[in-house]
Structures are given as structure tokens and as C-alpha cells.
Image (cartoon, rainbow, N blue to C red):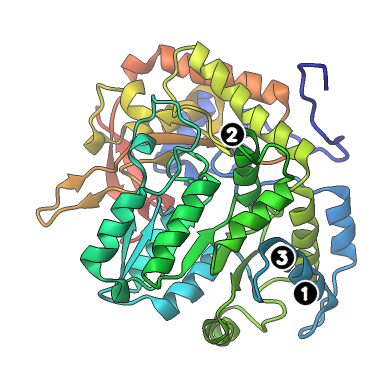
Amino acid sequence: MKYKTIIEPFKIKSVEPIRFTTREEREVLLKEAGYNPFMLHSDDVLIDLLTDSGTSAMSSKQWAGIMEGDEAYAGSKSFYRFEAVVRSITQMKHIIPTHQGRAAEKILFSIVGGPGKYFPNNTHFDTTRANIEFTGSEAVDLLNEIGKHPEIRADFKGNMDIEKLETFIKEKGPENIPLCIITVTNNSGGGQPVSMQNIRETKAICKKYGIPLFLDACRFAENAYFIKIREKGYENKTPLEIAQEMFSYADGVTMSAKKDALVNIGGFLALNDDDLAMKCRNLLIVTEGFPTYGGLAGRDLEAVAQGLLEVLDEHYLQYRIRSVEYLGERLIAAGVPIIEPPGGHAIYIDAKRFTPHIPPEQYPGQSIVCELYIEGGVRAVEIGSVMFGKYDKHGKLIPAMMELVRLAIPRRVYTQSHVDYLIEVITEVYNKRNNLKGYRITYEAPMLRHFTAKFEPIR
């Protein structure tokens, strides 16, 4: 198109009112929530960017599909539509539905994990890491070097470090590595894409040592679009064709459909290995349900199938990626330090540069998250030493690689004016950044502590 303005490729058919709160109200609400935005009531949040998982607005065709959902316990026609759509994209033999992505991870790693085993990834996200470590295995991040520097711009900062991967395999022994994972896009690394070349090279290393390659495909369509616009040789291919090539290098897939399937619940595990698929289905029956519904209602399977078709529409992907890029550009212009270039589903504030006076052990990202809510009712999430920090044997914090605040953008939910308001709020917090204080943890769970931890400000 000759016009610069990229419009939303949809019309709004239903709206949900937003409740406005005062700063004084938010100060009280945040304190009652233990200074953890996860514990806030959603109707006390003005702009909710806690996650892009399950927060999408569904289309009229998805809602129509819900009405057509076949709720038969076994052999539902909705499952067979779901199976056909997933198979057409992934080309996998075995399609196993689950109620969300972490359920697929739980089933997979319960079978292939265990003490003494290692799972390399470009960067594991929180539930993937937790499900691996719950079995006694070790989750290892092998992000390429440029991806560790928020201020440096590069096209594919989510890539696996190929040399480190091969060194790691030789060091630990391929017999101790049940599978290798690539997360597309790389969520913990700033929503940064992975190139087709990197997927291909990772596959070559895995094949050399007889290690299956899996994709964590939560945002596969966004990754495919980045490849289209950034990687030579793919500019004339459709997002579907690019996605199909991505999956052609994989031996298995886990996916939370709550992201790039544009639904509020759902996921799947897709496999080529017959024996592994049989074991996964047997465990699925114990934990999720019969293999043709896997913890989902038939209507949800219909919505997922339709969403997977809609997410690959090029007009939608152009709008989606450009909307996030617009937010990033405006924040950079205001001086706000973020991971550059902007990612696919979120903007990541670099808390180390935003609040250099707050050390990692006082959780600078959590400080920013709290202030965003107090200032403008914006809910975000810390992705740093709260989420990924560990303790040494003396109880001292081992900080995360990066201290980030993620602003995850729900799909088809917020408009241009919401984003412009968000820019104002973040800029105001940045201008008052020297007044921000650190936080200490007063309660934490042994795993995935960020969900339920309680904090208090350090006065």
C-alpha cells in the first residue's frame, strides 16, 4: 500500500469497559497485593500487559466455531478439524491436544527428563525451565552473544549459539541430552526472532549427534514474519510456507495456543516419534483427558483451529509487528532504554539502564513494574532476578543474565490511543526514575516464585 498508516485489519464488534482508578487507590491496592501485580484483581488494572498469553480478542469466526463445537468425549469432529489444521502447518504425525502449553511440557519432560539429563535451549522460558527442573534435569541456555546486549541492534538476536551447543553436547555427552529446544520467538531474550539459517544449523548439529530437535512454537507465526522481512530469500514466501519450513527441521513441537492461536485457552504437543507419542498419550489420559480432547472442550478446539488459520494472515502479522515496533520507537525517542530492536509480542525495558542505582539483589525490574501500576494503572511483569534469579549455597542471590520489564501486548485488544497513553505513563516513570527504590522478597514459593511472591519496598 502507498500509505504509511498501517490500520488494524479488523473491525471492533464487541467492547469491554475499563474501570478507572486513582493513584491513591492504586497505592493501597498494590500494597494489599504484596507489591506483586500478579495478585491484583484485573478490574483494578487500566492497561494489562502482564502477559500476551490467553488475552487475545477472538474473531467472529472463532466465536461461530465455538457454537459448532462437538462436545463428544471421544472422537469429536472438532478434534479432527483441530488435528487437520495443526498437521497442515507442522507436518507432524501425532497431534496431541492439551489445555495449555505447560501441560504439553509437563507430559513431555516427565517422560524424557530425569536426574543427570540436560536440555539445551536458546533461552528457556519460566514454565519450560520449571517443568524440566521438576524432573531433576538441568535446563541450559545457550543464547548467542549479541542477544545478551539489549542496546545492540541485530536482526536475529534470539538465535542459538551453535558453537556453544556443539561444545556443550561434547562435554555432557549426547546420551545425556534427550532433546534440544529452540524457542521461537525467544521470549526471555526479548521476544527476539530466530533465523531460518540458525534453525537449520541447530538441526544439523542435533542430527550429527542423534539428538531430536523440538520447537517451542508459542509465537511461530510472528517468528515466520520476522524471517520474511529480515532474512534474504524469504521475502516472497508466505508466512505459512515459512512456518512449514521451520517445522520441517523439528522432530517435535510444544505450543501454548494462548499466544499465536489467538485463543484464551489451549495448547498441543506434536510429535513424529511413534513410541514417544504413545507414551505421551498414555500420560495425557491420566493428567489431561482422552486423546481427542486433551483437557479442552470441543468448542476450544474449534477456536484454536480457526485461530491458527487467522494468525498466518500477512496483513494481521504486519499490523501486529508494526504496532509493537511503534511503541518501541516512541520509547526510544523518549530516552527509555529497551531491548533493541523491538520484539514481536512485547517491549522489554532494560531495568539495569533504567534504574542503575538499584542493584540486582533489590530487584530493579520489580521496582519499575510497581511504579508503572501506581503511576498509570499499567500492569507489566518483571523478567529478571525475581523470575530467574537463584541462590548459591550461602543463600546469596545469583542474578539473572538480564534485568528486564516485559510489556506484553495482547492480540487485537488495545487501540492506538491505548498505546499512546502507555507511552506517556512509561515516559513519566522514566523521568522520575531516580526516585525509585528497591524491593525485598518477604515470601517466595520454591518454584516459579514470581507468580505468588510478596515484596516490600526498601525504605
Residue 405: name its quadrant: top left
Name the residue carrying label 1. 79
Which residue is identified by label 3? 86
Whether tag 1 and tag 2 are in contact, CB under 8 A, the answer is no
Disc 1 is placed on an element classified as helix
Q: CA distance from mark 1 to mark 2?
A: 35 Å
Front one among 429 and 247: 247
Residue 383 shows which numbered tag?
A: none
Q: Residue visible at 82% across and 34% down?
A: 9
* Front residue of this view, candidates 117 and 389: 117
- x, y percentage for residue 343? 54, 35
Label 2 sits on residue: 230
Helix or strand or loop: what does disc 2 sit on? helix
Q: Amino acid at mark 1?
A: Phe
Horizontal side of 162 relative to 90 (left or right) equals left
Label whose residue precedes the other's in the sequence (3 or 1): 1
Check the image and report above or below for 205 versus 192. Answer: below
Tag 3, which secondary structure?
Answer: helix
Q: Residue at x 60, y 78 (%)?
A: 288
Q: Position of residue 138 (x, y in %)?
A: 29, 65
Report the residue at 53% width, 87% height from top.
275
Residue 22 visible, this orientation: no
Which numbered mark, 3 or 1, is in the foreground of this view?
3
Determine whether label 3 and label 1 are within 8 Å by CB: no
